[in-house]
Amino acid sequence: MRHLKILEYALSSLWRRKYKNMAIILVYAFTIAVLASILFLTHALKTEASFLLAEAPELVVQRVSAGRHELIPLEYGDRIRKIPGVAEVHPRFWGYYYDALVEANYTLLEANADHTPLEMLDGHLPAAPGECAIGSGVAAVRKIGPGDDLILVDSTNMGIVFEVTGVFRSPSDLLTNDLVILDRADLIEFFGTPPDLATDISVRVNNPKEINTIAEKIKRQMPDSRPISRSEILRTYAAVFNWRSGMMLSVFAAALVAFCILAWDKATGISAEEKREIGILKAVGWETSDILELKFWEGMAVSLTSLLLGLLAAYVHVFFLGATVLTPVIKGWSVLFPTFRLIPFIDPYQILVIGFLTVPPYVASTVIPSWKAAITDPETAMRG
């Protein structure tokens, strides 16, 4: 009961100085919201990337010319197929297309290519030339569905009409939101790809432990090739998103500086009004431990309120508003994709880190100066 009464008094004390405390909470919550938004967005994108690559082949072989990705000869697939340990080899045909009508980039992929399992929302995948299936993002941005026509401009600057046979999605909107699936013959003709070339080659191996060995053999037999393992792609995604999030944290360092100044101002002293209040409490019989507990609860109330508000604001900003402020930097050129909503993925460890870096410093900056006033003679404290 004693501790509850102290908590009740702490809350009433905060309410008496409500405008000052509200200002502190707003600054505090804004700082946490900025940090949490960057961490939430980065973690969600990395999780989306892991879903995107969950069903990807163990190796993707590209051809490189002058340091750039080039079309790869189909006969490379025949040579790779003969390497011991290789289970499957599939030439892949795909490419990017910029839709000037809605200012968005699409990924065009052949219908029988390896891709993440698709959940058909309506219709079916293309089964004949002149048909296509589209991701839910393309359907939304173009406002079309099964039975409608999708007009795309090919490599010869001619408008080609495709009948939409289905709309799909997958566990990762990052993959399928901008995806358009076409028949292989249509895709080759659309991009004007020579008949003996493919975009790249997917390779599946029997033993995952031999991936690096097979990649070395491919590189040795075909020096102009570039084997890329699934784990390397995941590490690249993680490195890119971590680097961009670090850059954003640097940009918003001003918010961290503002919080540090706020905590330092609290730690360097308390107001004369608060000193008089502590002196009065000591005079009426409060112990030093009671006053420290009082200030502890005041600091915890402000910190936890700010933490919850900041985390809630970050959650809404990232997962409901699409991280409007951070998207251009974290996603990079992918902002040209049809807009998609991230699936909420939150790492509890990140919340613990945010709480540890923000709550204890503020509570300490509240308790320490109060301890100095609590051990002062009550009459001196009441005199200010």
Image (cartoon, helix red, strand yellow):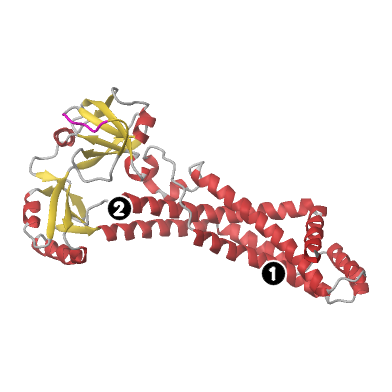
Principal SS element in the magenta part? loop
Q: Quadrant of the N terminus?
A: bottom right
Q: Amino acid at mark 2?
A: Ala
Element type at mark 2: loop
Give x and y (percent) for residue 146: 30, 25
Question: Around disc 1, counting alpha carbons within 10 Å, would you say few (fewer than 14), some (14 to 19), or many (20 or more)?
Answer: some
* Pair 1/2: label in front: 2
Q: Residue at x 27, y 51 (%)?
A: 55
- State the image coordinates of residue 57 (x, y, percent, origin top left): 22, 53
**Which numbered circle lies on residue 54?**
2
Q: Residue at x 30, y 53 (%)?
A: 54
Sequence order check: which comes first, mark 1 or mark 2?
2
Q: Is residue 89 magenta?
A: no
Identify the image quadrant of residue 185.
top left
Q: Amino acid at mark 1?
A: Ala
Q: Residue 46 occupies which quadrant of the picture?
A: bottom left
Q: Is residue 334 left or right of residue 259?
A: left
In the depicted structure, whether residue 146 falls above or below residue 333: above
- The magenta segment: 124-128
The picture places residue 113, in percent across and down from the top left corner, at 19, 43
Q: Which residue is mark 1?
A: 364
